[in-house]
């Protein structure tokens, strides 16, 4: 029978293809196109503006490595914010931490939240935790309006196009700094060291101008462009190379050893920061 393939054109010279059983949902939201397809290799996949956001079978890498590195760097993370991340994957990992008293999700596109609850219940489950406050709002405005409030802030954005452009801008990083407590830290997803070198360079230059400590770390995410993915941390005080003892048990990627190893950068990545 006929074979259906999903292709993400990652840039004009590079694409990833996944064989698809069927399309489960397609719509144009107020902000972006949103599709859910069932792939043969990685299960259900969430796609925004043609870009792979997450799949059932590899989402754990990204969500664990975004959430747990920051939450094992801060000794007492009580008040946490996620900008973006409407699928709920980072929140699911955050609420595994008993120290967390409140986790705010500031997602601009409420349809991402609705569709994740419907098609990705395993990923969205954390949104039901009583400590979670789901807000459909502009995350940039939210950080501007909450000065000195958060211990840890995450930026779980799409690529720096469309609704996410402002989340890679220097004045946003300054607003994030101001929204953090005096010992706070933030972590953002910052794309691929193979495909987005200029972006990583710029982010690091900007974050270094604002935060006293800036770090880059890596994880392997098979469905994102090139499979090698970077995260940037800006910290006012705490050092991620000295993580606290693991506070979570049921992880598939994160361990204390993986946390430390993620900061070991190959020379071609080191030279970007
Ligand atoms: N956030 C990172 C998506 C970037 C992937 N880029 C791409 N496929 N071109 C995903 C949201 C997961 N919670």
Image (spheres, helix red, strand yellow):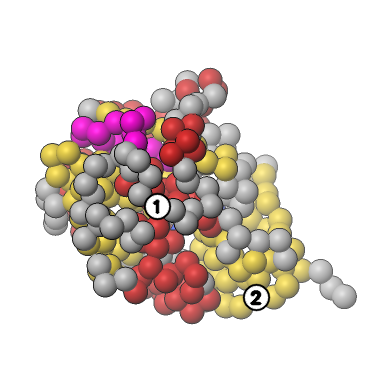
Q: Residue at x 44, y 66 (%)?
A: 87
Q: Which numbered mark, 1 or 2, is in the foreground of this view?
A: 1
| Quadrant of image for the C terminus | top left
233 relative position to 23: left or right? left
Based on the picture, tell me whether residue 205 belongs to the magenta stretch. no
Residue to which mark 2 is pinned: 23
Q: Residue at x 69, y 75 (%)?
A: 22
Residue 263: x %, y % from top left: 44, 30
Image quarter of the N terminus:
bottom right
Reading the image, the residue beneath label 1 is 248
Marks 1/2: CA distance? Answer: 35 Å
Q: Nearer the viewer, residue 212 or 210?
A: 212
Instruction: Give the image location of residue 171, x and y in percent.
Output: 24, 42
Dividing the picture into quarters, in which one does residue 231 lie?
top left
**In the image shown, does 248 or 1 lie closer to the viewer?**
248
Extreme residue toward the right, this view: 1
Relative depth, front residue between 131 and 197: 131
- Point out the tag, 1 or 2, that comes first from the N-terminus: 2
What residue range appears in magenta? 230-243
245 and 206: which is toward the camera: 245
Query: 10 Å neighbourhood of mark 1: few (<14), some, or many (≥20)?
Result: some
Asked whether mark 1 and ligand 1 are closer than 8 Å, the reply comes as no
Residue 18 placement (x, y as % from top left): 71, 59
Can residue 202 be seen in the rendering of this structure?
Answer: no
In percent of the image, x 57 and y 39: which residue is there?
228
User: Is 21 left, or right, of 77 in this rendering?
Assistant: right
- Tell me the quarter of the picture where residue 129 sits: bottom left
Badge 2: few (under 14), some or many (20 or more) residues near its Cα, within 10 Å?
A: some
Q: Secondary structure at mark 2?
A: strand
Percent x, y for residue 131?
Answer: 25, 67
């Amino acid at each position: 029978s006929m074979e259906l393939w999903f292709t993400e054109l990652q840039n004009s010279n590079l694409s990833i293809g996944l064989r698809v059983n069927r399309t489960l949902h397609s719509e144009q939201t107020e902000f972006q196109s949103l599709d859910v397809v069932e792939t043969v290799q990685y299960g259900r996949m969430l796609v925004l503006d043609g870009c792979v956001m997450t799949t059932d079978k590899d989402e754990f890498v990204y969500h664990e490595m975004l959430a747990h590195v920051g939450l094992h760097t801060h000794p007492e993370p009580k008040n946490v914010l996620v900008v973006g991340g409407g699928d709920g994957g980072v929140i699911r990992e955050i609420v595994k931490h008993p120290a967390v008293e409140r986790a705010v999700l500031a997602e601009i596109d409420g349809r991402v939240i609705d569709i994740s609850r419907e098609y990705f219940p395993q990923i969205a489950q954390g949104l039901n935790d009583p400590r979670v406050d789901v807000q459909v709002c502009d995350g940039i405005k939210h950080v501007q309006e909450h000065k000195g409030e958060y211990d840890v802030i995450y930026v779980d954005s799409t690529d720096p196009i469309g609704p996410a452009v402002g989340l890679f801008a220097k004045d946003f990083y300054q607003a994030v700094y101001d929204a953090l407590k005096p010992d706070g830290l933030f972590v953002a997803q910052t794309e691929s060291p193979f495909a987005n070198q200029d972006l990583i360079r710029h982010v690091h230059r900007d974050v270094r101008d604002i935060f006293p400590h800036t770090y880059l770390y890596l994880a392997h995410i098979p469905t994102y462009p090139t499979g090698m993915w970077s995260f940037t941390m800006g910290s006012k005080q705490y050092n991620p190379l000295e993580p606290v003892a693991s506070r979570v048990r049921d992880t598939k990627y994160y361990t204390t050893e993986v946390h430390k190893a993620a900061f070991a950068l190959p020379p071609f990545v080191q030279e970007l920061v």
